[in-house]
Amino acid sequence: MSGVHPPAQHRAGIRFLTYLLVSWIANAVVLGIVAWIFADVHAGTNGQLVVAAAVFGVLNTILKPLLRLLTLPFAVITLGLAWFFVSMFMLWLTSLLVSGFDVDGFWTYVWATIVIWLLNLVVDLVMGRGRAAAAGAGGSVAVTR
């Protein structure tokens, strides 16, 4: 039967894999642009950039929400500034874990984190609906926030 639709679980799995692929590509583009803008951000080879994008995505998907929960009291006191440092920490961890992807200097981390945030806003505006559909959500899906 060629007109039979795949089971819902199969479609959900395909949507999730599509979301991961789109997020991975978006992270690679964002990190590549940051490396292009800042002389103190070194992306390494294309392969190292792709690995950095994957690591950055995994950290932002798994570790960042946990750290945001743990730092919630500080975020309330600092009016959200604490979460900026959580985002910087994700970038620092990525540079620590991926050989060839390096960020040199505290202020480079600060400005690179700001640029990553801005670029993700653009990515969300441009691809928000497509990524939301891929994730099976009704709204925009953030890559790294």
Image (tube, helix red, strand yellow):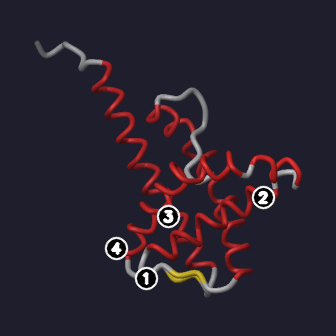
Disc 3 versus disc 1: nearer the observer: 1
Residue 98: x and y in percent read 43, 74
Disc 3 versus disc 2: nearer the observer: 2
Q: CA distance from mark 2 to mark 4?
A: 32 Å
Check disc 2 and report its element: helix, strand or loop. Answer: helix
Q: Which residue is mark 2?
A: 82
- Count residues near mark 3 (Cα–Cα under 10 Å), then give few for <14, some for 14-19, many for 20+: some
Q: Which residue is mark 1?
A: 100
Q: Amino acid at mark 1?
A: Gly
Residue 73: x and y in percent read 80, 48
Residue 79: x and y in percent read 87, 51
Mark sitting earlier along the chain (2/4)? 4
Q: CA distance from mark 3 to mark 1?
A: 16 Å
Q: CA distance from mark 4 to mark 3?
A: 13 Å
For image coordinates 49% across by 38% down, the residue present is 130
Q: Is residue 76 left or right of residue 110?
A: right
The number of numbered discs placed on residues in the rendered structure image is 4
**Where on the picture, by quarter, is residue 88?**
bottom right
Q: Which residue is mark 4?
A: 47
Q: Amino acid at mark 2?
A: Ala
For image coordinates 72% across by 73% down, the residue present is 111
Closer to us: 1 or 27: 27
Residue 81: x and y in percent read 82, 58
Disc 4 versus disc 1: nearer the observer: 1
For image coordinates 38% across by 34% down, the residue present is 15
- Count residues near mark 4 (Cα–Cα under 10 Å), then give few for <14, some for 14-19, many for 20+: few
Q: Which mark is residue 29?
A: 3
